[in-house]
Amino acid sequence: MPMIDLHCDTIMKLYENKNSQLFENNFQIDLKRLQQNDFLLQTFAIFLDKKQYPNRKETALQMYQRFIKELEKNAATIGLIKSQADYNENKVNKRISALLTLEEGGILEGKIENLEEFYQLGIRLITLTWNYSNEIGTPNILYWDKKMQILADNQTGLTKFGFECIEKMNDLQMIIDLSHASDQVAKDVLASSAQGIVASHSNARKLTPHPRNLCDELIRKIADKNGLIGINFFDQFLKLNQPTDLPTAISEHLWYMYQLVGEDHLCFGSDFDGIPVHPDLNDVNSFPKIIQSLKQKGFSSRQIEKISYLNAENFILHYLPKGEVK
């Protein structure tokens, strides 16, 4: 079964482990295992925590260069895609496609020209927030009452710069990622953006009450915009104290969302190399377990194809420019 995954943090691992290699490593994702699991495309996030790396843009550019060097070393196996033509060429030549994203819009440092610069480098998706406020908006984690397991209702939404970003991303046909964002930021984006909305690595809050998960209203609104939701493999987003194994929990979240919005808006967003190793799902070699769980849950072969790669492939190709970006 061909596979596409909408989110991983492997670039951060490569950056922080200077002697590591993309082709084979002890992380949760490497090229050898992606090949073994028939991956068409892996989305790679440039992610950083500003507490650790206060020079956000500079560090992000260093991460970018580190990753590009790995792609150059493995050019026969994987290729960066900036356009539909790049993806189609990789597919014909049986190369994995790498789609680059930014996770944490603070990397833009509040400047639209930085957004344009990263677009020229090949960034095609931006996760607007991480776990703190930035120039674009606020994350849900700031409004979460752990004891009550509810969100505060005094959330703030997009900033003025945030709205400017959404407008520019629409102009460029960049994909807007709502994972991590506060409910109000998500609602502002959904109300103001004409296109290109995903929650790349988020689950269903109704099943697991956690601020990183999506309420039913947002799941429906993302689907109404022809958007995508990528299921996150982190155990805290999949279950609380239930004895369920993680592949089963993934199938339950997907089934719940399928009942809400149908099969055309679901995919995978593992968050590998950004989440702890779990014995149920050690690494990218765990995808066959998940496929088996989907079969047991009652998903048809065609539905599993859609979740595994077709939905993500169609969505990404729709927003990628056709040819070379000048």
Image: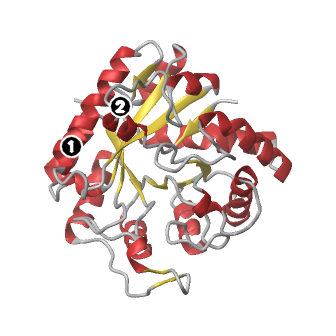
Classify 10 Å Cα crowding around label 2: few (below 14), some (14-19), many (20 and above): many
Question: Which residue was labeled with disc 2?
Answer: 82
Corner quadrant of residue 86: top left
In percent of width and height, residue 226 lies at 54, 55
Above or below residue 232? Residue 291 is above
Which mark is first along the chain, 1 or 2?
1
> At x 51% / y 13%, what residue is drawn?
93
Report whether 296 appears left or right of 255: right
Q: CA distance from mark 2 to mark 1?
A: 22 Å
Front-most of 280 and 67? 280
> At x 55% / y 37%, what residue is drawn?
313
In percent of width and height, residue 276 lies at 53, 50
Q: Which corner quadrant holds the N terminus?
A: top right
Report whether 238 appears left or right of 92: right
Classify 10 Å Cα crowding around label 1: few (below 14), some (14-19), many (20 and above): some
> At x 56% / y 81%, what residue is drawn?
149
Question: Which residue was labeled with disc 1?
Answer: 59
Residue type, numbered disc 1: Thr
Between marks 2 and 1 in the image, the one whose residue lies nearer the viewer = 1
